[in-house]
Amino acid sequence: MTPTAKPEAPGDWPTLLKDNARTGGQGLHQAKSPEGAVWQFRTGSSVRSAPVLEDGVLYVASVNGVLHAIDAVTGALKWKFQAAAQIHSTPSLSENRVLFGCDDGRVCAIDRRSGEKLWEAPTGAEVWASPVVRNGVAFFGSADAKVHAVDSASGETRWVQDLGGRIYSTIYADQHSLSLGCGDGKVYSLEASTGKILWSTPTGNGIDSSPAVADGLLLIGSEDFFLYALKAATGEVRWKYETGLGISSSPAVAGDLAVVGSKDGFLYAFDTQAGRLRWKTLVGEVVTAPPVIGDGVVCIQAEGTFALDSATGNVVWRAALAGTVQSVPVLAGDIVYLASLSGEVYALR
Amino acid sequence: MDRRSFVKAGCIGSASLLMQGLDPMMRADAAPKATPPIELQGLSDYKPSPLGMPGLFPGRVVAVRKSNAIVRNRVSQPIVRQMLEHSMKELTGEKSVQAAWAKFVEPNDIVGIKINPSGAPACCSSPEVIREIISAVQSVGVPSRNIVVYDRYSYEIDIGSYQALLPPGIRIVGIQEAFSGTAGYEPKIYCSAEFFGEWETRSYMASIVAHELTKIINVPTMKDHSASGVTGSLKNLAYGTFNNVARTHRAPYSFTNPLIGLMCTVEPLRSKAVLHIMDGMRQVWHGGPLTQVQNFIDQTGILLVATDPVALDTIELDAIEKKRRERGAPSLWQHDPNSITSDNDVFCHDASKNLFFRQPGHIAAAGKLGLGVADLEQIDYLLLSA
């Protein structure tokens, strides 16, 4: 089982946490039961996004507008960047840049080595979605109800496309098309080069879930309680599954396994193509964050952190820490990195 | 003196009336220490508004119930629209919806919509209701940029996904990010009291309420509350406007009575809160305010409007009491020490247990402060069904 949505070119970061399995590009690692903390880091503010790891540096954005670059081995702060506004956006990485959105509507690109700002691109309202990059273009939606495409090296605007509602869904960027959900309740497909709307498919309520696209199928949750599987080419509904409450969690997909959380507190696993429910497991009162798929395991943060057997849904281990709204564990071999709503960052082994 | 005039006269009161005692039904062995002195500091030289609580229609509550307003936990926006329009016309006596709203909101207002996201997603202010309120406020001529949907904790707003579910152009504000701190609060407006030896004895008013908003539309839900008995209009305003309020209860005791009512008298909160729209799509009869246990949440499909928060909360209290009786749960007024548990899990799943001696008397106490009518016999309650 391998994570799909492999980047096509260096610098590509085509979806939330880079790949459909939401590994942040780490690949499918096991998640052994941790025995203790290697280090702990306090950001001093709530963390409402997921950390990302690359080249031994963990990037964590805290809601007070600080992007932290933390040495993944020691937990020491390498540098930090103070943005002009709050950050709810999960960072993405592209070549030498860290990209993230801010509540003042700007998307910032920061030099990964120095922590210096390279460029910023304005929008009309807060950007909570994670910027994605494909073929040298960064794409992101904003609460101004627009999708923005900018040059990933300079931040210069390529195009802007109006949609019908506020956008908190992170785009999935294919070679030629973009997919995302919107607050107006529709799933949109846009032409990547122009922003032209290729198709839209309505759901029964607004969408803040981010899509995964695998083998011609687009999976996304809606606040109408359903997980949708649409044909990526046309938007036609292939299957949908009703959970107990709204879905703001974003599905993780690896091979024929698709997993998503629901606000009813369950984590659901499906056959990606057929939509058959494999298992569902109660992991808390409410689940809003995306899961991450590892090697034989699925991890999710809710009120605490859970690791579940990906075949059965049985809980393998749980840690009563790192409660979250939107954060996702980083599974990196022997170590699991977690960020919590209260602003703590943990490296567990 | 006609009935309306009588009701209005009965609203006049003062803080000294309230301080005379706690709930009359409280048993001696359940009594905490005496209520400490409470200092209130409002915005100095603020001229009270005639629209302020109890507002234009003291003692009046209009409710509309529609069985299909919520089906399988999904709220119907078209039906909510009908319910809101109907109830607003009935409350105001106006023939048009726009005229009804124009009694409360003007085009140059900065309108705050105070939601209740605590308890999301199982029971919170429904985005469908909020969308209709936004639309109504816009219909009076208030631009989107001057409409602010807000509450204290931004993470609770996140869990409710209000950001994605509300229209573009309006602002959505969580007053504070973390569980403590005074950023976002006005240091000159506060309620001060030492309840349980806490080191910080002040609760400050949110700056956005003190200085930015000119009108507040309050959108509470219908829930029991482990400390205050119910959480309705008064508690949503008071404990959603001032910080550092959890300090008022330490199991099994609570000072939500009298603090909730007292906070609502503080200017400019009292003057700015001009309308209360209670979202009764769901009704929590045990485990509130945060329960996610669906067995304790009925899908009632009711919407209530009032300018008088005391009358509205009195109707709510009556409804929750009735529901608890139907389900065999003890009264919210019961102060039996045997019903108290310190185990949150037990409380969450056993309707006969509670964490505190509840204080539903906070509603009547608020009535004595002049915030509205707490006597069911005096309340002009109109329930419309379809």
Image (spheres, coloured by chain):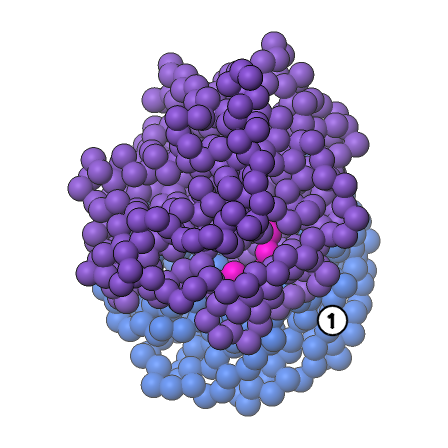
**Magenta region, residue range:** B241-245
Q: Which color was chain B given?
A: purple
| Residue identifier under label 1 | A82
Chain represented in blue: A
| Quadrant hosting residue B145 | top right
Q: Nearer the viewer, residue B8 or B357?
A: B8
| Quadrant hosting residue B227 | bottom left
Magenta span contains residue B243: yes
The answer to whether residue A123 shows anywhere in this view is no
Q: Position of residue A312 (x, y in %)?
A: 22, 60
Is residue B94 depicted above or below B34 in this figure?
above
Q: Subunit of mark 1?
A: A
Is residue A2 depicted above or below A245 in this figure?
below
Residue most toward the top?
B95
Q: Residues within 10 Å of mark 1 (few under 14, many from 20)?
A: some
Residue at the (79%, 32%) spot, across then down: B108
Is residue A18 depicted above or below B18 in this figure?
below
